[in-house]
Image: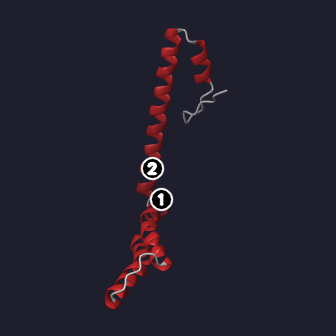
């Protein structure tokens, strides 16, 4: 699947470059050339979606990464609350209490 994506994304640019080499005329401003370069760059993005859809190990790795990041954010938020309690900072405590699981805090 990844190989198919690679071939589909890179072949148009390679054909264009080969034909440009044969004809000895390269026009980097050509819309088709620009499209093929974007398509080649898109291959890197497409691979992540292929792995996410196809491979269980990749899915488990992403889940564990998200779980670890969430755990660290919660620990950091808890430390901030403890510091605010120690300093008796009521405004900071109210701000921290408005934070959600992702660590986003409301400003108003």
Q: Residue furthest right?
A: 108
Residue 1 visible from this viewpoint: no
Quarter of the image for the C terminus: give it: top right
Mark 2 vs mark 1: which is more N-terminal? 1
Give the residue pinned by disc 2. 62
- Percent across and percent down for residue 17 are 36, 81
Residue, x 43% and y 66% (percent of image)? 41
Give the residue pinned by disc 1. 52
Residue 92 visible from this viewpoint: yes
For residue 93, above or below residue 105? above
**Residue 6's quadrant in the figure?**
bottom left
Residue nearer the viewer, 31 or 57: 31
Mark 2 touches mark 1? (CB < 8 Å): yes
- Percent across and percent down for residue 60 are 44, 51
Residue nearer the viewer, 89 or 6: 89
Residue, x 46% and y 62% (percent of image)? 45
**Residue 26's quadrant in the figure?**
bottom left
Residue nearer the viewer, 83 or 26: 26
Q: Could you say whether the residue bearing mark 2 is in a helix, strand or loop?
A: helix
For residue 57, above or below residue 69? below
Q: Could you say whether the residue bearing mark 1 is in a helix, strand or loop?
A: helix
């Amino acid at each position: 699947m990844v190989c198919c994506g690679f071939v589909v994304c890179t072949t148009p640019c390679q054909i264009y470059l080969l034909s440009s080499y044969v004809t000895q005329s390269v026009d980097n401003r050509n819309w088709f050339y620009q499209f093929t370069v974007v398509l080649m760059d898109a291959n890197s993005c497409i691979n992540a979606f292929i792995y996410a859809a196809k491979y269980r190990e990749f899915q488990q790795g992403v889940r564990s990464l998200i779980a670890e990041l969430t755990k660290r954010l919660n620990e950091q938020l808890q430390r901030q609350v403890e510091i605010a309690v120690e300093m008796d900072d009521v405004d900071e405590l109210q701000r921290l209490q408005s934070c959600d699981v992702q660590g986003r805090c409301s400003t108003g």
